[in-house]
Amino acid sequence: MPPVPSVSGERVVRALEKAGFVVARVTGSHHIMRHPDGRGTTVPVHPGRNVAKGTLRGILADINMHVEELRRLL
């Protein structure tokens, strides 16, 4: 498995928006993202902090996306 990049929650949200996801709602610091095909996930957006690598792997698993796809979208 390729290594997961170290990125902020804001960059993850922007990358997922390029892939067709939209922010359905924001609860605190968590952005709930939905895709028209039904996929969805929650992205933590904490200023000045990157998303934990395990959390990012979980996000990618939720939306059936590979690390390579995320890297292309960043």
Image (cartoon, helix red, strand yellow):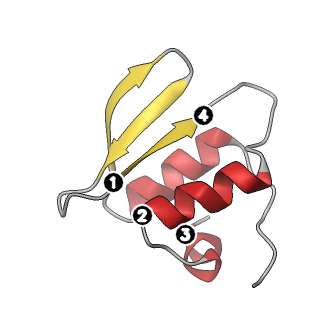
- In this rendering, position of residue 5 left or right of residue 32: right
The structure residue drawn at horizontal position 69% and vertical position 26%, both measured from the top left corner, is: 46
Q: Position of residue 66 (x, y in %)?
A: 56, 78
Q: Is residue 18 above or below residue 25?
A: below
Q: Three-letter amino acid code at disc 3?
A: Leu
Residue 73, labelled with which disc? 3
Q: Three-letter amino acid code at disc 1?
A: Phe
The structure residue drawn at horizontal position 62% and vertical position 64%, both measured from the top left corner, is: 74
What separation in Å lies between label 3 and label 1 (alpha carbons)?
Answer: 12 Å
The structure residue drawn at horizontal position 52% and vertical position 27%, both measured from the top left corner, is: 30
The structure residue drawn at horizontal position 52% and vertical position 66%, both measured from the top left corner, is: 61
- In this rendering, position of residue 61 left or right of residue 56: left
Mark 3 or mark 1: whose residue is earlier in sequence: 1
Secondary structure state at the residue bearing disc 1: loop
Q: Nearer the viewer, mark 3 or mark 2?
A: 2
Q: Quadrant of the N terminus?
A: bottom right
Q: Which residue is mark 1?
A: 21
Do labels 3 and 1 touch, CB within 8 Å? no
Q: Which residue is mark 4?
A: 44
Crowding at mark 2 (Cα within 10 Å: few <14, some 14-19, many 20+) = some
Q: Three-letter amino acid code at disc 2?
A: Ile
Q: Which residue is mark 2?
A: 63
What separation in Å lies between label 3 and label 4 (alpha carbons)?
Answer: 18 Å
Q: Three-letter amino acid code at disc 4?
A: Pro
